[in-house]
Amino acid sequence: IRPPLVLGIETSCDETGIGIVRGTELLANVISSSMDEHARYGGVVPEVAARAHLEALVPALEAALAEANVTLEELDAIAVTSGPGLSGALMVGVGAAKALAVSLDKPLYAVNHLVGHVGADALDADPLDYPTIALLVSGGHTSLLLVRDLVSDVELLGETIDDAAGEAFDKVARLLGLPYPGGPQIDRVAEGGNPKAIRFPRGLSHAKDMDEHRYDFSFSGLKTAVARWVEQKRDANEEVPMADVAASFRESVADILLTKALAACADYGVPRLLLGGGVVANARVRQLATQRCDEAGIELRIPPLSLCTDNGAMIAALGAQLISAGHAPSAPGFGADSTLP
Ligand code: KG4
Ligand code: ZN
């Protein structure tokens, strides 16, 4: 049997993502981001994101169909992110997916955004075996998952108890006077700095926290520590060593992320780690992941960035896997669920 031709729709945050796959083959991955529209607010504004999805969705769909060289009629199924994410943003994608499914008479699959990030790996020529640990780090989430089976057994081990990792980058960038989104800015400035110049705290990573919060993350204390440190310098009329602050902050985030991820790999005896989310673009996160996984004998998978940041291809890929595993389409009554676990 021919692998299913699936359209994936992703609108959980500020990226309108339309992807098309045939089984595990990627045919199109069109992403339209409203990032620029949020820049002057210093963060994603839900209402602005939702409106941007409305405007971007049909053009992105047309571009994806052209890129994949298929028609809507040829599709076998449609998959859509139903949560978690921003309510209004999710509703645009879910509404569009339902309209397409009904008008074209195609089966519709509602999928979980975080599981979608893991599903992206199916598009690799050599996908990871399961079980795997997945570390998903973006502006909206910081989650550690134990994936025993993509379609039937995904366990949330831990997540952030305050800010997401990307959010921490964005907030620290802002207090350093760098533009939004701050992650790439900090990453760039950090390259010229000394990561050991300032010892910023590693939230929930110290021995005493590793019992109770072994897989949870916290970045707000780190952000406050950076703010205080910078304030003291400014109050004393001393120059703020931007590169050192950026490098030391980046080092702390990378250390926290990898400490937690590798603890999970060790505890569950899982020699595989999959990364996902926009923060995976971070040079130090990639470097430290490579180094520590090497030392621990863990197979590390870092998907191409276009499949790490939010995208429709990962949603389509997960939909295709649900179909291949014999799952029935979602009941038509489902809606956007911003707090989907
Ligand atoms: O997955 P993503 O594109 O989308 C959402 O979260 O919606 O992730 C965006 C986040 C932003 O917070 C951005 O600052 C961060 O990822 N980011 C980075 C880097 N590139 C993007 N953080 C650290 N270093 C980077 N190089
Ligand atoms: Zn995401």
Image: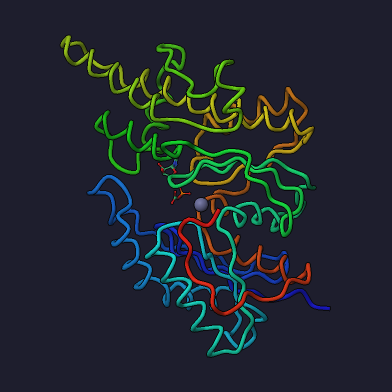
Q: Is residue 200 left or right of residue 293?
A: left
Which quadrant of the view contains residue 312?
Answer: bottom right
Q: Residue at x 59, y 64 (%)?
A: 111
Foreground pick, 32 / 106 = 106
At x 46%, y 37%, the residue is: 165
Along the viewing direction, whichever of 47 and 243 lies nearer the viewer: 47
User: Quadrant location of ligand 1?
Assistant: top left
Q: Which quadrant is home to the N terminus?
A: bottom right
Vertical arrangement, residue 19 with respect to residue 163, above or below? below
Residue 274, horizontal then vertical, whole percent: 66, 42
**Residue at screen point 66% across, 64% down:** 317
Residue 19 picture location, percent across and down: 56, 68
Question: x and y percent of residue 130 in the render?
Answer: 78, 47
State the count of labels.
0
Say left or right for 329 vs 229: right
Q: Quadrant of residue 14?
A: bottom left
Counting from the top left corner in percent of width and height, residue 38 is at 29, 53
Of 251 and 142, which appears nearest the observer? 142
In this picture the colour scheme is rainbow
Residue 98 vertical position relative to residue 87 in the rendered view, above or below? below
180 up-or-down from 28: above or below: above
Q: Residue furthest front?
A: 212
- x 62%, y 22%: residue: 211
